[in-house]
Image (tube, rainbow, N blue to C red):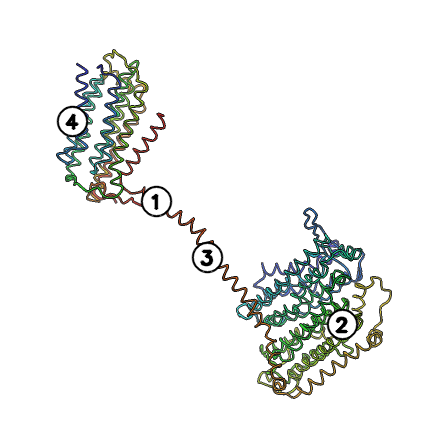
Amino acid sequence: MKVGFEHYLILSALLFALGLTGVLVRRNLLVIYMSLELMLNAANLSLVAASHFSPGHSLDGQVFVFFIITVAAAEVAVGLALIVALYRRRQTAHVEDLTTMKL
Amino acid sequence: MQDALFYLFGFLTLLCGLLVIANPFSRNPVTSAMFLVLAIASLGGLFVLLHAYFLGAVQVLVYAGAVMVLFLFVIMLLDVKAEERRKIRGLTGKLLVVFGPLSVIAILFLFFKSLSAGPPNSDPNPTLEGGTIVLGKLLFTQYLLPFEIVSVLLLVAMIGVILLSKKDLR
Amino acid sequence: MNGLLHSQNLPWLVLFLPLLAAGLITLFTRRDRNLSAGLSIGAVVAGFIFTVVFLATSGWTPKTTESTFVWLSIGDLQIDFGLRFDPLSILMMLMVTGVASLIHIYSWGYMRDDAGFSRFFACLSLFTFSMLGIVLSTNFVQLFIFWELVGVSSYLLIGFWFERTAAADAGKKAFITNRLGDFGFLLGILLVWKNLNSLHFGMLQRIVTENPQALGALTTAAGLLIFCGAMGKSAQFPLHVWLPDAMEGPTPVSALIHAATMVAAGVYMLCRVFFLLNLPASNALLVIACIGGFTALLSALIAVQQNDIKRILAYSTLSQLGYMVMGVGLGGPEQSMFHLTTHAFFKALLFLGAGSVILALHHEQDIWKMGALRKKMPVTFWTFLVGTLALAGFWPLSGFFSKDSILATALEHSHPMVKYGFFALGALVAILTAFYMFRLVFVVFLGAEKSDGPGHAHESAPVILWPLRVLAVFSIIGGFIGIEYIYHRQFTSPEEAHALTFAQQLIHPFTAAPIAALGGLIAAVLGLAVAYALYAKADKDPLPEKLGALSRGMRNRFYFDEIYQATVIRIHEFLATLADWFERWIIEGFCVGLVRGGTEITGKMLRQVQSGNLQVYAFLFALGVAFVLYLALK
């Protein structure tokens, strides 16, 4: 079967779902963060596919992905710095131990 | 040929993604990180299939090469042990186990339903486009402002990281 | 300025100057004692002067009988606020401002050492304003407003030394008892308004003269309900219990409020609306006379065995008020008003004299600790004696003429049982009056010293003695300066051609109603004689042994307070407890508790969402996304 836009979209959706499940199920902070990255990548994939299959082959999707990758990199840096600081304070990266915001 | 490659890379991505979140053999976060690297790499392959050569390269260089390395640095810096298996405590935990995947499936279901409602039109003859030069031209003309802002963003992130990772934040 | 002092506007000034003084003192001059006293005394003395000027320019029956403006106008109901000028109100105005001026001046000396000096004068001024409002009002509503104001002033002044529990309780008792009477009063006013559709005195008089059956079957009821107000204010049985306790207030207060003016307001009101009471279909007057007579007798009996100088005078006031009310009931409003006026003079004199004695003996009030004060305090003694003679009814002092007029009215009544019954009652009360008053004089001023106190006493300051002298003069001449004539003009015929001269007035009682006159004189002499026999040289009271249980009853005020405590107060406390239970359990526990509990439970449930668990939050995100997607793609 000829691979069309739907195939890429389905793939992206499944990848997104995988990432979301990882966020909800895993309990190590770092693994949760990695699942988050997976979700971002899924979005990137669908954007590039949209750009490819768009009439006129506009490259807007790719530009968008360019920015997403940049921002993701910055975000990862900051997030990991936060996790490092948190780990230094609490000596744990287990998300169930970090419930000080409980009412 | 291209279809076969698509199916290969697609399957690889999904497999690696699954292994990131649910590895039956090891609960070590390093294992998850390595599989994530693999997933990103196969995504890079998919990008190339979609004629986004520059982005494919960027994906491998930056995402797999820098971001994931950063991840691994931090994992090893913190010396995170393998995640202990803990019993799912409390009502919230049990509810989560049931409803979490359910909500994911619901989102998927909705997506597929909308997809079947009206398939987007796809060009049967894609051309070879997406070269670096064209992308670069677009970046520096139409999307100049976001480009500059993103560079400031990177600066800010850098400063933030330096500040956050100081030994004692007084 | 000329326009302000125009004759028509003077009464407005007289009415509102004391209010202005009270306001200024309360707001601004509390710290400056002399300024406060000056403001207060100035306001009331100016009021007296203005009244005299007004009288001089307009005479006893001015052409314009009223000066009003519309205050409230809703549908059919129109209530004015204004001043009424007829002989009754002008004479009352004169009397109130005059006596009040003297007592204000007296208070300056009496309250000199008191911490609440300025507050006292503010309250006195407020009272003067309220009392003037009562005597000048044109309609029932205005009367009622000032009626209540007078009650408030009385409360403030009785409980002036509020740190003393007894004084605070006395103030409350006075106010609450008054309120009971006012409840009946209000009902009476409403009855009158419903049936006659007006509240204005002049209008009511016209309606009732044209149509005496206007009130129909409710004539007696309306009359009696209105009398309830007088019962409360003038302390008639059974609402008489507050007046003796009101002696907890300072002596000038007792003199002003509980002798001369406020308690007289009830009698004044009865005379003002006399036309509503003496309708042919009404039996109210007979009931009023009975109650008045009974009060007079009861209080006189109690006074015989009291040992506190102010209590004796208080019961004497009660007795005389009973006399006045009895006079109204017997169909003699002008005689009652006459007695009211003369009583104001000599009772105020007696109270102020008692105050002088109390001050000299450093607030000692038991008469059995006094004695032989005649030599130490001559002016006080002589003025007090004048007051006593006037009260007992010796000729030619004022009390004789006024008391005699009431006795004469009794004898003029048509019904024979009423005629002789009330005359006998009046004579008996006159005997008792003379008896207990001379008991007081003999024990306090004559005889031997009964303790150390009198040894150190000395005469009071001039500022205290001059009011005594002025009042003594009026007590002497009050009977024949034509006061009765003025009231005659008010009640019988507005255009009386002639007035009697001084000499004629002196012998008038003996010629017009000889039995009453002689009866009164004999009664007075009898009382004096018995008192002399028992008390002239007594060291302690000889009556308790002679009378035994009766004496004990008299001393304990015939146990009225105890009866009220056991019955009325008990019921009231029961109701209060019931209401408290209802409030606590049903309203607060059930209704409010329901809301509070419900809110608490809801809050507790909602709080579970904030678990602090990151993944729970992420899960909720996912749920939200699913929901939004569903809505978007529907």
| Quarter of the rendering containing residue C557 | bottom right
Q: Is label 2 on the same chain as label 1?
A: yes
Chain under callout 1: C
Q: On the rendered structure, is C264 left or right of B131?
A: right
Which mark, residue B38? 4
Q: Residue at x 70, y 68 (%)?
A: C99
On-image quarter of the N terminus of chain C: bottom right
Q: Amino acid at mark 3?
A: Arg
- Check disc 1 and report its element: helix, strand or loop: helix
Distance between the Cα atoms at labels 2 and 1?
83 Å
Q: Crowdedness of circle 4 by 10 Å Cα count: few (<14), some, many (20+)?
A: many
Distance between the Cα atoms at labels 2 and 3?
56 Å
- The residue sitting at the right extreme is C497
Which mark, residue C418? 2
> Which residue in the protein does label 3 denote?
C584
> Compared to B29, does C158 lie above or below?
below
Chain under callout 4: B
Distance between the Cα atoms at labels 3 and 1?
28 Å
> Compared to B7, does C168 lie above or below?
below
Q: Nearer the viewer, mark 2 or mark 4?
A: 2
> Which residue in the protein does label 1 denote?
C605
Q: Amino acid at mark 2?
A: Val
Chain under callout 3: C
- The residue sitting at the left extreme is B25
- Check disc 4 and report its element: helix, strand or loop: helix
Distance between the Cα atoms at labels 2 and 4?
126 Å
Q: Amino acid at mark 4?
A: Leu
